[in-house]
Image (cartoon, grey):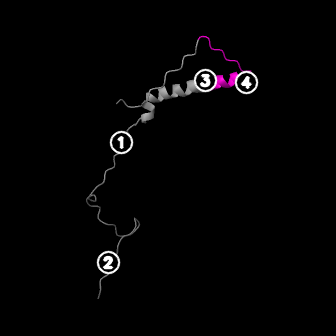
Amino acid sequence: MASVATLAACAGSPEKPDAGAAPDPVIERVVVVKPVCPPELRQNIPAEPVMPADAVIEASEETLRWLGAIFSRTALLEERLRDARTACPNG
């Protein structure tokens, strides 16, 4: 006569396996966050060109508003670049 072994397959099974030692090997995960600064952010921001003392801009009001918006956008982007550099690690 052949013997039949039962295998406990779920927590509700009547026979539970022995809760002996922890399985070997134990895998341990370690997550390390390391900030990295892109090389483009480390480049120097070019100096702002100096407007000549005798410069004259003649344009329509719409064009002058557009030029003002371009200058404002440039200043904002430069400020964001300088601010982003503060998050870069030294080195």
Image position, residue 40 (x, y; %): 45, 34
Closer to the eye: label 2 or 4: 4
**Which quarter of the image is occupied by the N terminus?**
bottom left
Q: Of label 1 and label 2, which has the lower sequence position? A: 2
Q: Sequence order check: which comes first, mark 2 or mark 3?
A: 2
Quarter where residue 56 is shown: top right
Badge 3 marks a residue whose secondary structure is helix
Local crowd size for mark 2, using a 10 Å CA cut-off: few (<14), some (14–19), many (≥20): few
Q: Badges 1 and 4: C-beta atoms under 8 Å apart?
A: no
Closer to the observer: label 1 or label 4? 4
Asked if the residues shown at circle 3 and circle 4 are in contact, with their CB atoms under 8 angstroms apart, the answer is no
Q: Secondary structure at mark 1?
A: loop
Residue at 58% x, 14% y is 52
Q: x, y percentage for residue 44?
A: 44, 26
Label 3: how many Cα within 10 Å (few below 14, some 14–19, many 20+) = few
Q: Is residue 76 left or right of residue 33?
A: right
Write the start and end of the magenta stretch as one range.
53-71
For disc 1, the marked residue is 32
* Mark 2, residue position: 5
Using the numbered discs, state the Cα–Cα distance from disc 1 to disc 3 in whole angstroms.
41 Å
The one nearer the camera, 2 or 79, is 79
What residue is rendered at 49% in x and 28% in y?
81
Q: Which mark is residue 71?
A: 3
- Choose between 60 and 31: the one closer to the eye: 60
